[in-house]
Image: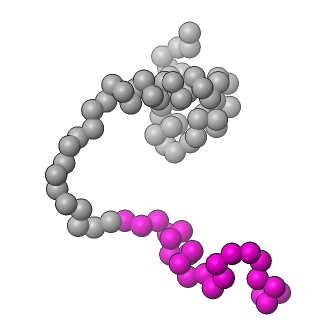
Amino acid sequence: MKPLSTKRKALQLYLGGLVFRAIGRILNISYGTVYQWVKACGDQVSLPESQDEVEIDEMDEIHMYVGSKKSTAGYDMDSC
């Protein structure tokens, strides 16, 4: 049994964007345990249901970078 504070920290790290394996390494616990905790908390939460249409969609900056690349795959020998 891990303390409740460890579970809370794992959930905070997950919500902060860390993956299960990274959280497991940081807290010195199994990534499977982290997964089970996150899944159990997710099963307890009900998501809000909204019927509103989305007017604005935010895109990540990586989309703009990938879209502006000249080559689509591989290593470009002409740039050397």
Count of picture labels: 0
Looking at the picture, tell me which residue is in the foreground, 21 or 75.
Answer: 75
Q: Position of residue 60 (x, y in %)?
A: 46, 65
Q: Position of residue 40 (x, y in %)?
A: 42, 24
* Residue 27 showing in the rendered view: no
* Residue 14 showing in the rendered view: yes
Q: Is residue 79 magenta?
A: yes
Q: Is residue 50 left or right of residue 42?
A: left
Instruction: Say which residue appears at 23% left-offset and 67% top-offset.
Output: 55
32 versus 21 height, above or below: above
19 versus 41 height, above or below: below
35 versus 65 height, above or below: above
Q: Position of residue 37 (x, y in %)?
A: 49, 24
Instruction: Say which residue appears at 47% left-offset and 34% top-offset.
Output: 12
Is the C terminus in the top left, top right, bottom left or bottom right quadrant?
A: bottom right
Q: Is residue 75 magenta?
A: yes
